[in-house]
Amino acid sequence: MTRDEVEAPVAEKTDGGLQPARLGEEPPSKEERIDFLKQAIAFTEWNIRSYDTKAQISIAAFVLSMNPLWSILTSAYPRAGATPTVALLLLLFVATVLLFGFVIWPVTLTGTGLGGTWETKGLFYVGDPNRLTASLYTDRLKSLSIEAELAAETLKLAAIREIKARRFRHALKATVVFYGGAVLCLLLLKSCAAGNNPWVCGK
């Protein structure tokens, strides 16, 4: 064996095929991989909690904003509460609040197959503790594959985070539509005060 063959880097198998390994680069140890998964889980859990917190703050701020908005609408047209346009605006208001509340609603993943071909036992977050006993849980721990369990839970939490993020985006879009509708409603109510558009004013 020549000197070049000894110093040549070993090829690593990746999704895109065999790639040459870098000189001096060693694969992470088992402890490092487990620590990485633990940090990924902690960070993803923090993201999930942040979406819940943002949704709660948004609900409070959105509801409080309705009071000055209502004052503006009634100042533009005293009988604003009896108009169909304001009724539609109130329906949109309730729908937006529900969308923010839906962000906080718990997410349950069933049959997602995120674990792939890994044989995970679901011991990190026990889905239904009534299906296990202490002795059965202990027996399963003896044959536990820690990396597979942590990786599966990381993927599950990432899926929950994406669901929360999608719900929050929908709620934000509804908020923009609501305030846009409020501006349009204000313009229509001003026309009502001027005696125009009787169908908008409910006359």
Image (cartoon, rainbow, N blue to C red):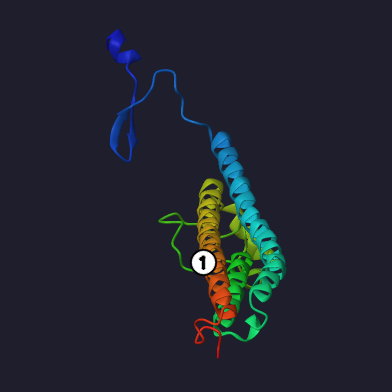
**Residue closer to the observer: 133 or 162:** 162
Mark 1: secondary structure: helix
Q: Quadrant of residue 179?
A: bottom right
**Residue drawn at the location 29% of the way across and 14% of the way down:** 5
Q: Say how many tags the image has.
A: 1
Mark 1: few, some, or many residues within 10 Å (few <14, many ≥20)? some
Q: Which residue is mark 1?
A: 177
* Quadrant housing the N terminus: top left
Q: Position of residue 151 (x, y in %)?
A: 51, 49
Farthest bottom residue? 203
Image vertical order of residue 99 relative to residue 39, above or below? below
Work out which quarter of the rendered image holds the C terminus and state it.
bottom right
**Relative height, residue 77 to residue 146 (above, below):** below
Kindly identify the residue that appears in the image at 56 percent across and 53 percent down. 143
- Quarter of the rendering containing residue 137: bottom right
Residue 15: percent from the left, percent from the top?
32, 41
Can you say whether 2 is above or below 114 in the image?
above
- Can you tell which quarter of the image residue 39 is in? top right
x 54%, y 38%: residue: 33
Position of 175 compared to 26: left or right?
right
Q: Residue at x 60, y 79 (%)?
A: 193
Position of residue 70 measured from the top left corner of the image (x, y, whole percent): 68, 72
Asked whether residue 144 appears in the rendered view, the answer is: yes
Residue nearest the viewer, comparing 139 with 74: 74
Q: Give amino acid for label 1.
A: Val
Side of 64 relative to 147 (left or right): right
